[in-house]
Image: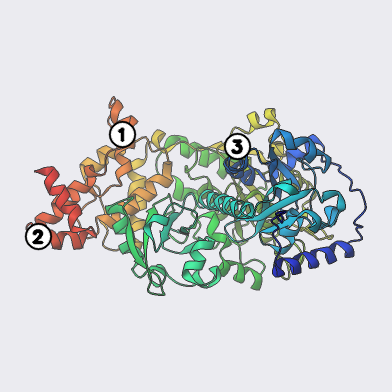
Amino acid sequence: MTRRPVTPHDAARADMIAHAHARSRALGLRTTETPEFGALAAVDLRELIDANRTLYHQARPVMDALHAQIVDTQSMVLLTDRNGVILHSLGDSDFVEKAQRVALRPGVSWAEQHRGTNAIGTALVDHQPTTVHAGEHFLRANHILTCSCAPIADPYGRTLGALDVSGESRGFHKHTLALVRMSAQMIENHLFGTEFAEAIRLQFHARAEFIGTLYEGLAAFAADGTLLCANRSALFQFGAPLADLQQRDFAALFGQPFATFMQRLMHAPGEPLTLALPSGVRVIARATPGAAPLARSAPPATSRAVSAHAASQAKAPNAAADTAPQPTLADLDTGDARLAAALQRVARVRGRDIPVLVLGRTGTGKEWLARALHHDSPRSDGPFVALNCAALPDTLIEAELFGYEDGAFTGAKRRGSTGKIAQAHGGTLFLDEIGDMPLAQQVRLMRVLQERAVVPLGGTRAVPVDLRIVCATHRDLRAMIAEGTFREDLYYRINGLVVTLPALAERTDLAALVARMLDIVRREVPGAPARLTPAVEACFARCRWPGNLRQLASTLRTAAIMAEGEDAIDVAHLPEDLVHDCAPPGDSKAQREPAPLAVLQSRLIEDTLARHRGNVSAAARELGLARNTVYRHLRRRG
């Protein structure tokens, strides 16, 4: 008896394939034609990979793992950009030659308009995982293939590219699409972690064993509890779209005040938490503190893309301009000689439209200097617009910076979008981490600076712009020019005046900075102490502060919440990892290894037990810990 070959056919797929074939015919393609396999030139392919470098680097290890699962099946793993152009491929050696005949290689487009119905092009058009098998391909030349593809989206659901497995049609297996879908979801979760590296991130699921897997929900929050984004699994568990969730506070989403959640997180970092979804379903969660900024008035760059902000931007072209309080140059001068010298240099050009390039390590206050320069300039009545070139996926920087017309690309908003350059008209444009801008966008920015006009994506009319540009980076731009990753002509356009900000560990005004930051914290946490104990002052003085001002601000905010109602912030109120950064000189072990959780947790438990006269239940309730955790501590202490 002859065994009938397994095929992926069903009624829904038949309808999908029929629609895709109709699109192919409407594009003027013929089933018998021999497609042209012209690939991008090597230099153009490098530029395309650079423009998609975040996707490329996050996908590579996942592609290696996927290829290991399908090795010796005469198949290839392919990564494409959002337009279906192959960026990278991995394949079995015995299939590579056959794959070259149908142009399954980097630099070749597999969009429907070039290849007709195929898994890559059709998945990108339909925005869903797709298998196209053998004769389902529109072009007869591709009937030798069986292909399974899944689109890859950024954290906001916008398509970045696609992951595909293609092989000989005789090797079709019904489980291949499931492997591809899981791998694409893994890439999306990695992109989520990269996008919100500085936010407070929450992993959650109703079943504890799913934490850390593809099925976990991921949510990112700003320092004030504002929801920035959530992945597909999180949206499914909430049963609501992202735009709706962003209108609710943390308590409405997870059944407890955000301050309570943060206290529990700082008491027991890394330990599972139990939270309640709006549906009443209880979930197990793990949280990562991140390095979120102090308050809502200075949100991370990623929060600028939330839907509420997008809605306000649609109502008023300049609504995206930053309305946070602007410091003055005098405000930033807290007594350090090196910083004062930099501020004096900047002050000399504040009334002139000379571009300023601010250098310094991450977290040294480059954006605050840009804000102060804007505030003290004749443009202070105009908008201050900031864009962090490292905080957005590469494929979105162009749309965010230059804007786009209605219908410029799939997923574009109706009526288009005003880009950051046009929003900054009459004011100041601050481009943070300019060294992370893709080469393709560097070329367009150079043209804007030369012509003082911007053409939105999909548009034909140049829009005049009058703005001052301030750029910042922690990278060595001259070294990048030598490597060919930063344009020399753009470098000389943005460095009219170069100033370097010192690292926090090199500054002499730590006490003044702490006092000023505590004043800001106490407006948000009224019961917070106004001073530090001598032990904390000594700890701060010897700290290496690798996160600079951002780390200091985050440390003080966390400690202030922990010390609410106390006379002063003590060592027990500090985040655990700060002990590692503030190890005494010569303490090589402390410099190599973080202090164990017990170092700080023990002090908190013992102080709380003393206040409750040894009542374990009362102490556990106040600390937000399980009683067994307190008992384990007591047993360890004898």
Q: CA distance from mark 1 to mark 2?
A: 38 Å
Q: How many marks are shown on the rendered structure?
A: 3
Mark 2 near mark 3, Cβ–Cβ under 8 Å?
A: no
Q: CA distance from mark 3 to mark 1?
A: 30 Å
Residue 187: image location, x then y, percent: 57, 49
Residue 300: image location, x then y, percent: 50, 55
**Which secondary structure, mark 1?**
loop
Quadrant containing the C terminus is top left
Check disc 1 and report the residue beneath it.
542
Specify the quadrant of the image occupied by residue 252: bottom left
Check disc 3 and report the residue beneath it.
498
Along the viewing direction, whichever of 268 and 22 lies nearer the viewer: 22
| Label 2, residues with CA under 10 Å away: few <14, some 14-19, many ≥20 | few
Quadrant containing the N terminus is bottom right
Q: Amino acid at mark 2?
A: Asn
| Label 3, residues with CA under 10 Å away: few <14, some 14-19, many ≥20 | some
Residue at the spot x=65%, y=55% of the render?
A: 150
Q: Relative to residue 27, is residue 305 drawn left or right?
A: left
Check disc 2 and report the residue beneath it.
615
Mark 3 near mark 1, Cβ–Cβ under 8 Å?
A: no
Residue lying farthest left?
A: 613
Residue at the spot x=90%, y=58% of the render?
A: 29
Considering only order in the chain, which callout, 1 or 3, is on the residue closer to the N terminus?
3
| Label 1, residues with CA under 10 Å away: few <14, some 14-19, many ≥20 | some
